Image (spheres, rainbow, N blue to C red):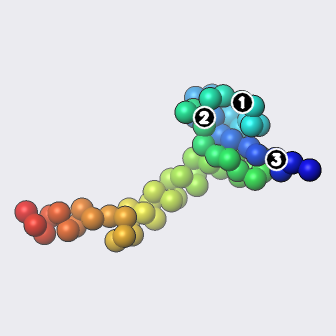
Amino acid sequence: MTKSRWYYCIEHRTVEPFGGCPAKDRLGPYATKQEAARALEMAKDRNEEWDHDAAWNDDEDDEDKA
């Protein structure tokens, strides 16, 4: 049995199965349609986390050198 994979198309703003739009226009894969529908929200949350993570944000080091 094959696992379902779902994607969020940023071009059409829709959830789609594996055989949808080109990969360059999609986020995913996600395990469920519901997860794919939340793709933009999850990406925003992750970006905010990374903005506050010293391991991903070295801008402060660059400012100290200036």
Q: Is residue 43 visible?
A: yes
Q: Residue furthest front?
A: 1
Residue found at x 58% / y 29%: 11
**Between disc 2 and disc 3, whose residue precedes?**
3
Task: Measuring from the top left, give residue 41's x and y in whole percent.
Answer: 58, 51
Residue found at x 34% / y 71%: 54
Residue found at x 70% / y 50%: 30
Q: Residue 4: which disc?
A: 3
Q: Dot 1, how many residues are within 10 Å of its Cα: few (below 14), some (14-19), or many (20+)?
A: some
Q: Are marks 1 and 3 in contact (CB under 8 Å)?
A: no
Residue found at x 51% / y 59%: 46
Disc tally is 3
Res 51 quadrant in image: bottom left
Cα distance in 3D space between marks 2 and 3: 16 Å
Could you tell whether 30 is left or right of 57 in the image? right
Q: Dot 3, how many residues are within 10 Å of its Cα: few (below 14), some (14-19), or many (20+)?
A: few
Res 65 quadrant in image: bottom left
Could you tell whether 14 is left or right of 41 in the image? right
Res 16 quadrant in image: top right
Amino acid on which disc 2 is placed: Ala
Task: Measuring from the top left, give residue 10's x and y in whole percent.
Answer: 58, 34
**Between disc 1 and disc 3, whose residue precedes?**
3
Residue placed under numbered mark 2 in the picture:
23
Q: Are marks 1 and 2 in contact (CB under 8 Å)?
A: no
Amino acid on which disc 1 is placed: Gly
Q: Secondary structure at mark 3?
A: loop
Could you tell whether 45 is left or right of 52 in the image? right
Residue placed under numbered mark 1 in the picture:
20
- In the displayed structure, 21 sits above or below 53; it is above
